[in-house]
């Protein structure tokens, strides 16, 4: 399955707009892999509202990996 990666630890400022841009560009069956320094719990409701599923994994002390795909 095609995969895109967005490491928001490298984004200057608020990353929400960049995440939304990536979600809008995400086509089926692509997966967006979001890398963050904390668990992005506020994002989960947004994903649900926009029709996305997600799986979250803590891969290091300050590194979270969230796989996002169309529901």
Image (tube, rainbow, N blue to C red):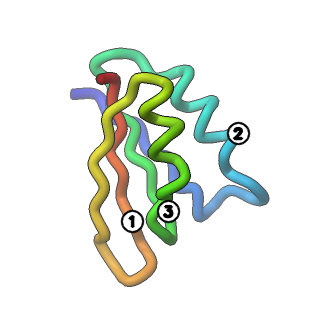
**Quadrant housing residue 8:** bottom right
Residue sitting nearer the eye, 55 or 65: 55
Q: Mark 3 packing: few (<14 Cα in 10 Å), some, or many (20+)?
A: some
Provide residue 23's location: percent of width, then percent of height: 52, 29
Q: For the residue carrying disc 1, how many other residues have a C-alpha within 10 Å: few (<14), some (14-19), or many (20+)?
A: some
Q: Is residue 70 left or right of residue 14?
A: left
Label 2 element class? helix
Instruction: Give me the C-alpha separation between circle 3 and circle 1.
Output: 5 Å
Instruction: Check disc 2 and report the residue beneath it.
Output: 17
**Residue named by callout 3:** 36
Which structural element holds mark 1? Answer: strand
Q: Residue at x 67, y 51 (%)?
A: 15
- The percent coordinates of residue 40 (x first, y second) are 49, 58
Q: Among all residues in the image, which is located at the extreme bottom?
A: 61
Q: Which residue is mark 1?
A: 64
Q: Is residue 25 above or below residue 58?
A: above
Quadrant containing the N terminus in the rendered view: top left
């Amino acid at each position: 399955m095609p995969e895109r990666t967005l490491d928001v630890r490298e984004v200057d400022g608020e990353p929400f707009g960049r995440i939304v841009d990536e979600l809008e560009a995400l086509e089926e069956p692509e997966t967006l892999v979001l890398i963050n320094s904390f668990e992005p719990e506020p994002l989960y409701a947004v994903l649900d509202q926009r029709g996305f599923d997600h799986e979250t994994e803590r891969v290091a002390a300050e590194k979270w990996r969230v796989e996002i795909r169309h529901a």
